[in-house]
Image (cartoon, rainbow, N blue to C red):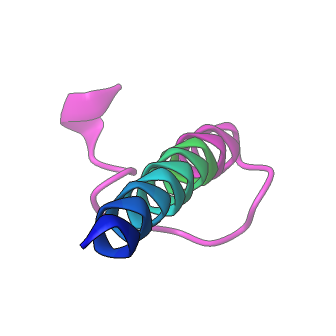
Amino acid sequence: MEKKGQLAGIEFHYFMLGLTIGLVLIVVLVILLKQGVIGFNVPLLSCPALK
């Protein structure tokens, strides 16, 4: 039983780490797309209502 509790803590730690890294990457990609550094056009991000 004790090992299962330890495993849940480790899994939660990696889940939060992955979530944090993913969110940071999304923010960086959105900033680069809006500045035109990346030539990939996303219709949602190029919407005039967001500018």
Q: Is residue 10 left or right of residue 5?
A: right
The verdict on residue 28 being magenta is yes
Q: Quadrant of residue 4?
A: bottom left
Seen in the picture, residue 51 relative to 9 is either above or below; the reply is above
The verdict on residue 19 being magenta is no
Q: Residue at x 62, y 37 (%)?
A: 31
Most distant residue in the left direction? 49
Front one among 4 and 27: 4
Q: Residue at x 75, y 61 (%)?
A: 38
Callout count: 0
Q: Residue at x 42, y 61 (%)?
A: 6
Q: Position of residue 22 (x, y in %)?
A: 53, 57
Seen in the picture, residue 9 relative to 48 is either above or below; the reply is below
Q: Which residues are magenta?
A: 27-51
Q: Position of residue 34 (x, y in %)?
A: 57, 41
Q: Is residue 7 left or right of residue 50?
A: right
Q: Is residue 49 left or right of residue 47?
A: left
Front one among 47 and 1: 1
Q: Position of residue 10 (x, y in %)?
A: 49, 61
Quadrant assignment for the N terminus: bottom left
Front one among 23 and 14: 14
Most distant residue in the top direction? 51
Most distant residue in the front direction? 1
Q: Residue at x 35, y 25 (%)?
A: 51
Front one among 27 and 32: 27
